Image: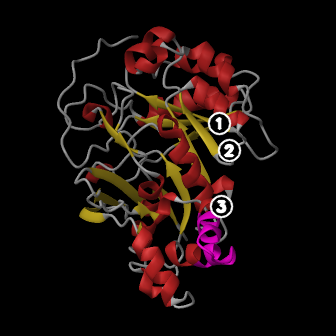
Amino acid sequence: MPEFAVPMENIKDYTLAALTEWMTGHGEKPFRARQVFGWLYPRGITGFQEMTNVSKALQAELAAHFHLGGLATASRRQSSDGSVKFAFRLADARQIETVLMPNNTHYTLCVSTQVGCAMGCDFCATARMGLERNLGTGEIVQQAVEAGRALEPGKRIRNIVFMGMGEPLHNYDNLVRALEILQEDNGFGLSARRLTVSTCGLAPAIRRFARDGIRANLAVSLNAVTDAVRTRLMPVNKRWNIAALLDACREVPAGNRYRITFEYVLMEGVTDGLADARQLVRLLHGLKCKVNLIPFNAYPGSPYRAPPPAHVRAFQQILLDRGVLATLRISKGQDIQAACGQLIRGQQAPPPEPMARTG
């Protein structure tokens, strides 16, 4: 019988617990897994031979079983505001986009969880791609490794938001493993409050997220206050309407420092009516939450546009006056198509059908 080589696994698909089990199964002490994690993430090695406190025999065994899951940088574009958009090439030649955004003393990284997206939101450029495939755990966390190499000395990635290409909760298991690795002391060592998972509103997955006690912030894309408008913008609303979505959100435990964030994209003449603002207050009554208002980020072919700044402030003020914590997102990287809703593998989005405007 001919012998066939067993494909090597991506070692970054393994959580610390899984790698510890692998080590003990191969006759190694459990602490070796923690040593290896320290090389994979904080140091971001490119070869197992770089692990100087690991025996050469173990280095060889790791190299025989695993690969390091590196991503090739297909392109890198820098915005006038300092944001950097990476197009990373995967092993199968598909591409994803990842955005590194500067703050005063640190960086926030926006990572992708899928190649494309199946959710079909009408205002999102990524939706034009459709879904090509899920990213593996290692492909998700490797975005942080690769972006970290681009930082100047003394700077670090302090926050990671799962708001890039794809619907994170549609890739639930790989997402949860990535969150575990990112929080591991021997991994990236990020606290749960530094990690935010965005979802378009998969109600059963939100309930599972709550039931499993996943340690991360949750941001829910609401974007409309009536089912008629939200269904036209977000097909997911046909299956789980606003009432079903908010019922699921009420099952997410609210800790002392924890609020669900509702993301609300303001599109002129579609979602920005001042009556919409008052209805939003009514919908969110009783929920411990905040609202993140996002003026629409245009992309080629989009039929939508952002409201004037004065109108955005008036919408925000209605929420604030009624006791709803409402922040205004200052989108970064718009000049390189790196802002919220603009990621589409560096390609121009084909023009969608125009949507009828509402009052």
Q: Which amino acid does label 1 sit on?
A: Phe
C-beta proximity under 8 Å, tags 1 and 2: yes
Q: Which residue in the structure is indicated by mark 1?
A: 209
Q: Can residue 160 be seen in this view?
A: yes
In the foreground, 356 or 186: 186
Indicate how the structure is coloured in the image. secondary structure
| Number of the label disc, if any, that sits on residue 33 | none
As drawn, is 162 to the left or to the right of 256?
Answer: left
Q: Which residue in the structure is indicated by mark 3?
A: 17
Which mark is in front, 3 or 2? 3
Image location of residue 53, percent across then percent down: 57, 90
Which mark is in front, 1 or 3? 3
10 in relation to 267, above or below: below
Image location of residue 351, percent across then percent down: 18, 28
Secondary structure found at label 3: helix
93 in relation to 149, above or below: above
Classify 10 Å Cα crowding around label 3: few (below 14), some (14-19), many (20 and above). Answer: some
Q: Give the distance between the C-alpha atoms of the residues marked 1 and 2, in whole angstroms.
A: 6 Å
Q: What residue type is labelled 3?
A: Ala
**In the rendered structure, which segment of residues is drawn in magenta?**
19-35
* Among numbered discs 1 and 3, the one appearing first in the sequence: 3
Residue 197 is inside the magenta segment: no
User: In which quadrant of the rendered image does the C terminus lie?
Assistant: top left
Residue 28 is inside the magenta segment: yes
